């Protein structure tokens, strides 16, 4: 940057970099939107060119019309799915963070219980559900438990990694100054683990939605108070492809919104002090 006649002017290299950053900011939104519009247009044209009946592959306009016509039914089912999703995510956060703190305080606790968390993670939920179905009577509790199992491990694993990744020199400095375990946890370990926790939270947010939908598929839940998975099952039996695609659209849109909201929360928390967020603002 140079000063000419009392005004600041960018040198060519700096101006090129500014233009590049501006193009990247615009392209980050314009390119995905353009590709999405092109894909929807091709979808519509394929249906027209091949004269595909709507019970096999409906046109995008038919899906949107169905979403409008069946809004009452679909959005009430969406609320059921969201309730299971957010409750399971909240329980995963409470359980995952709490257990991670215990693991950080005692290696014996970590060695004793971490293998059980891995077993829950690697065992398919469709294999666990028959046992849950035997021991749990309430349908909502069944779905909630299945979704929680899916969302729990990323938070536990990431937070535990963050708590154990504290710089040894800083840990020794705290000990030399007589810091208690609680003070080390509060002022050193928890802040250091925050980026790891938020990364796990973004993963768990999507998995909790997936877990809620898959759990309802496995449970075969039906009725007016059921979630979007039941609408998909029902539409599949009735060859009502427009409603099936409309329900899928709502699930996909919900997953995207959950990820964007959690990403925004992560950025707002980390933007003033963590390197990953600082780089995004340059």
Image: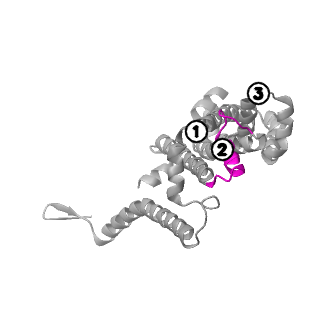
SS state under label 1? helix
SS state under label 2? helix
Q: Which one is earlier in the sequence, the residue at label 2 or at label 3?
A: 3
Q: Residue 215's quadrant in the figure?
A: top right
Using residue 197 as the reference point, say whether residue 99 is left or right of it: right
Q: Which one is earlier in the sequence, the residue at label 3 or at label 1?
A: 1
Q: Residue 129's quadrant in the figure?
A: top right
The residue where tag 2 is placed is 231
What is the CA distance from the residue labelled 3 to the residue labelled 1?
23 Å
| Mark number, residue 138 | 3
Frontmost of labels 2 and 3 is: 2
The residue where tag 1 is placed is 73
The residue sitting at 47% across, 63% down in the picture is 37
Magenta segment includes 231: yes
The answer to whether the residues at label 2 and label 3 have Cβ atoms under 8 Å apart is no
How many residues crowd mark 1 within 10 Å: few (<14), some (14–19), many (20+)? some
- Which quarter of the rendered picture does the C terminus lie within? bottom left
Q: Residue 224 placed where, x, y %?
A: 65, 34
SS state under label 3? loop
How many residues crowd mark 3 within 10 Å: few (<14), some (14–19), many (20+)? few
Q: Is residue 181 visible?
A: yes
Frontmost of labels 3 and 1 is: 1
Start and end of the magenta stretch? 221-241
Q: Is residue 180 visible?
A: no
Q: Residue 229 placed where, x, y %?
A: 68, 44
What is the CA distance from the residue labelled 1 to the residue labelled 2?
9 Å
Frontmost residue, 198 versus 205: 205
Frontmost residue, 4 versus 218: 218
């Amino acid at each position: 940057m140079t000063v000419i006649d009392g005004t600041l002017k960018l040198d060519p290299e700096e101006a090129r970099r500014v233009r590049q950053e501006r193009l990247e900011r615009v392209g980050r939104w314009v390119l995905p939107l353009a590709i999405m519009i092109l894909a929807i247009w091709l979808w519509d044209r394929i249906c027209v060119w091949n004269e595909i009946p709507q019970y096999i592959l409906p046109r995008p306009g038919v899906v949107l019309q169905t979403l409008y016509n069946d809004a009452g039914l679909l959005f009430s089912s969406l609320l059921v799915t969201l309730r299971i999703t957010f409750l399971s995510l909240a329980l995963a956060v409470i359980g995952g963070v709490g257990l991670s703190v215990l693991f950080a305080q005692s290696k014996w606790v970590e060695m004793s219980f971490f293998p059980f968390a891995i077993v829950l993670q690697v065992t398919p939920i469709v294999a666990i559900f028959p046992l849950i179905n035997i021991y749990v009577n309430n349908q909502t509790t069944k779905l909630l438990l299945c979704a929680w199992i899916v969302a729990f491990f990323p938070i536990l694993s990431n937070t535990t990694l963050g708590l154990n990744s504290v710089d040894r020199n800083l840990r020794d400095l705290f000990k030399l100054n007589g810091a208690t375990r609680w003070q080390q946890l509060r002022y050193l370990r928890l802040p250091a683990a925050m980026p790891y926790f938020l990364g796990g939270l973004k993963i768990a947010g999507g998995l909790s939605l997936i877990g809620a939908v898959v759990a309802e598929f496995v449970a075969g839940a039906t009725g007016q108070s059921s979630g979007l998975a039941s609408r998909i099952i029902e539409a599949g039996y009735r060859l009502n492809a427009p409603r099936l695609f409309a329900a899928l659209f709502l699930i996909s849109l919900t997953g995207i919104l959950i990820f964007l909201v959690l990403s925004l929360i992560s950025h707002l928390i980390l933007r003033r002090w963590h390197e990953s967020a600082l780089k995004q603002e340059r």
